[in-house]
Image (spheres, coloured by chain):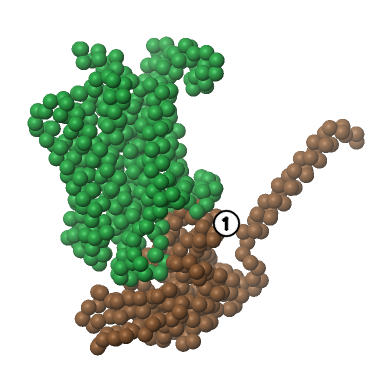
Chain colours: A green, B brown
């Protein structure tokens, strides 16, 4: 059979989960990572990252809105997906996705953004006319109380939501890892480390994305980049990356040392079909190079311009690396037969329902949503950061 | 008693609406009920299968019978409720058997040109193991796949989302997506037959009785004697799925 090496079970010819399912953990990972970056400022009082606080929240929202889309497009019967809410099977790891998702969207992100923006919304409501005024009215829920006391309450509530939000973000993405990690039929996925690895790789990708977005938006708006802010983010990215890489290496070393019957199949796969995406893209270009770049910044004294370039390169490589990691988990986990006696090939279509084109569109969509969100809810705090820099 | 017209209309309207809703709900309940098999009590049975490796001649009758009986697509790749694998094992290299299953064994097997000296060759019929602790049932997000009270793992095509998580979760590769319905499909152990006192299509068609449907709850079933006197094995016992396809004479190289 073309594309098949050795023996695979006859039903294994077709890969079950396509590139769209690669996007799903990638997107939710970006959400969780961006939110955790936002919580640094709010809960852990890392004042330096303040300029990115609101941008991180909006980024998380934009990506979270798109996250279920690849799943819906993948389902054989998307019209039945609502039954996951009505008649969930409680033993199923996947059944809780809808609830975890809704909780995170409505109880955490939307609420936190609303409290944080309430003052701006009320001011915009007061200043606008006509249809715009009506829309802002709805957005404020017709409450225009922005007295000192009510803003204090807003702030405390938003802080509380962030405190709840951190474990929720962990839950959202750790849970995605569990969906894969709990499949005992598949040795490539089945490891208790999976949720933890997913979580830290999520942080890495989310932090890198917000850092890149912040620098890009500064460029577009022609305002100077707040370097202490970006330096701090890059430092956190470096730390998160070190933990992530250690965990992934732990997983690898553990597999190599245990060397159970699946190792031969997996080892062969990594050396052949996954060589480019795993060794080259994920480990070398997507992990070792950015770690080296970010580590170099920690020990050398480069000028602002050079640092900015290094951050841009490291951030972009990081995103490529994490996307490759999702690919290697999802696609890689389906390339070998569960008989461990053979391999199949993933053939990706282009303009098909689960092809490359819809995947690219789904990846672009959150940026479009973010651009709209940034217009409606400007996240910029240039004045505040300018003042802080003066002080 | 004089009842105002308005109140009468309201009450009647409510009555009609409610009975309508109730009858709709009843239809719904009936639609979910299995095909009538008047004398069949599900809880009196616990189905499984015995497969005798040494009796299988690799003719593919079971695969053809299954596809015909259950309307399994024959023109699409990767749609098998049952299939047969051929193993060639060198005595000095049990870990690397040569296995083939052309078209799932549907057309039988081509002759091996050079069998080679000392190579052990045998056939392994495969089907859903109807596990008592099915990983596929565990993962279904909406409970569309379930274990029946008589120990058969079934799929409700009207509820399946087509998320394919169950296909991933089955360690034996027994599930596939029906390209016509976009829902998960698998061996039903010919549920429509066994509940009427018949055996499965594959067992019926096997010329050597290599496959036998067994009822582990029936004290008169010869399976009890068989299991007592033969050394049987299940596939991938390390995964503790409670598989109920018992293989007699299964070679250690079989995966």
* Residue A292 falls left or right of residue A326: left
Above or below, A140 relative to A65: above
| Residue A346: image location, x then y, percent | 35, 58
Above or below, B65 relative to A108: below
Q: Is residue A186 visible?
A: no
Bin the neighbour count of mark 1 within 10 Å (Cα to Cα): few under 14, some 14-19, many 20 and up: few
> What residue would you read off at disc 1?
B158
Which quadrant, please, contains the C terminus of chain A? top left
**Residue sitting at 45 percent across and 83 percent down?**
B59
| Residue A135: image location, x then y, percent | 52, 21
* Identity of the residue furthest to the front in this view: A351
* Residue B12 falls left or right of residue A344: right
* Identity of the residue furthest to the left in this view: A300
Chain hosting mark 1: B
The quadrant holding residue A153 is top left
**Residue sitting at 78 percent across and 44 percent down?**
B16
| Residue A223: image location, x then y, percent | 27, 19
**Residue sitting at 28 percent across and 48 percent down?**
A324
Which quadrant, please, contains the N terminus of chain A? bottom left
The quadrant holding residue A33 is top left
| Residue A163: image location, x then y, percent | 33, 30
- Label 1: which secondary element: loop
* Residue A344 falls left or right of residue B92: right
């Amino acid at each position: 059979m073309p594309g098949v090496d050795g023996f695979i079970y006859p039903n294994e010819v077709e890969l079950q989960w396509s590139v769209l399912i690669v996007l799903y953990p990638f997107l939710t990972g970006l959400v969780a990572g961006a939110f955790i970056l936002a919580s640094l400022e709010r809960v852990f009082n890392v004042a330096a990252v303040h300029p990115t606080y609101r941008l991180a929240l909006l980024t998380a929202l934009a990506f979270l809105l798109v996250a279920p889309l690849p799943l819906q497009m993948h389902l054989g019967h998307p019209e039945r997906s609502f039954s996951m809410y009505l008649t969930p099977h409680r033993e199923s790891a996947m059944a809780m996705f809808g609830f975890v998702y809704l909780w995170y969207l409505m109880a955490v992100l939307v609420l936190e953004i609303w409290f944080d923006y309430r003052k701006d919304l009320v001011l915009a409501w007061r200043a606008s006319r006509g249809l715009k005024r009506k829309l802002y009215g709805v957005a404020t829920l017709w409450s225009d109380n922005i007295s000192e006391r009510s803003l204090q309450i807003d702030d405390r509530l938003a802080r509380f939501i962030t405190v709840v939000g951190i474990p929720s973000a962990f839950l959202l993405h750790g849970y995605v890892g569990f969906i894969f990690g709990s499949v005992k039929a598949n040795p490539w996925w089945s490891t208790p480390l999976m949720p933890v690895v997913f979580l830290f790789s999520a942080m890495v990708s989310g932090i890198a994305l917000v850092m890149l977005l912040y620098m890009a938006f500064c460029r577009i708006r022609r305002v100077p980049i707040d370097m202490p802010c970006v330096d701090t983010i890059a430092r956190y990215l470096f730390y998160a990356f070190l933990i992530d890489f250690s965990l992934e290496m732990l997983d690898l070393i553990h597999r190599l040392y245990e060397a159970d019957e699946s190792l031969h199949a997996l080892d062969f796969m990594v050396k052949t079909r996954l060589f480019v995406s795993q060794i080259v893209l994920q480990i070398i270009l997507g992990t070792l190079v950015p770690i080296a770049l970010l580590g170099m910044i920690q020990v050398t004294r480069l000028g602002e311009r050079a640092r900015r370039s290094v951050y841009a390169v490291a951030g972009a490589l990081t995103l490529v690396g994490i996307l490759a990691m999702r690919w290697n988990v999802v696609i890689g986990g389906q390339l070998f037969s569960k008989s461990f006696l053979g391999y199949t090939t993933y053939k990706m279509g282009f303009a098909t329902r689960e092809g490359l084109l819809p995947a690219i569109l789904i990846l672009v969509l959150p940026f479009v949503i973010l651009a709209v969100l940034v217009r409606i809810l400007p996240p910029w705090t240039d004045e505040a950061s300018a003042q802080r820099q003066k002080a | 008693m004089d009842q105002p017209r308005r109140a009468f209309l309201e009450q009647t309207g409510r009555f009609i609406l409610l009975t309508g809703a109730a009858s709709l709900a009843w239809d719904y309940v009936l639609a979910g009920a299995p095909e009538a098999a008047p004398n069949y009590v599900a809880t009196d049975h616990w189905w499984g299968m015995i497969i005798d490796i040494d009796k299988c001649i690799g003719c593919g009758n079971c695969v053809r019978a299954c596809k015909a009986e259950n309307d399994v697509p024959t023109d699409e790749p990767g749609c098998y409720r049952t299939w047969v694998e051929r193993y060639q094992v060198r005595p000095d290299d049990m870990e690397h058997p040569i296995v083939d299953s052309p078209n799932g064994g549907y057309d039988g097997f081509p002759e091996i040109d050079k069998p080679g000296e000392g190579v052990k060759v045998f056939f392994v019929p495969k089907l859903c193991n109807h596990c008592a602790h099915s990983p596929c049932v565990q993962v279904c997000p909406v409970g569309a796949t379930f274990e029946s009270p008589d120990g058969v793992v079934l799929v409700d095509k009207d509820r399946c989302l087509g998320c394919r998580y169950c296909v991933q979760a089955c360690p034996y590769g027994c599930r596939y997506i029906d390209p016509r319905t976009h829902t998960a499909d698998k061996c039903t152990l010919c549920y429509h037959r066994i509940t009427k006192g018949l055996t499965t299509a594959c067992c019926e068609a096997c010329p050597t009785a290599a496959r036998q449907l067994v009822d582990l709850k029936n004290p008169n079933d010869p399976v009890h004697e068989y299991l007592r006197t033969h050394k049987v094995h299940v596939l991938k016992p390390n995964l503790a799925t409670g598989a109920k396809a018992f293989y007699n004479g299964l070679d250690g190289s079989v995966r």
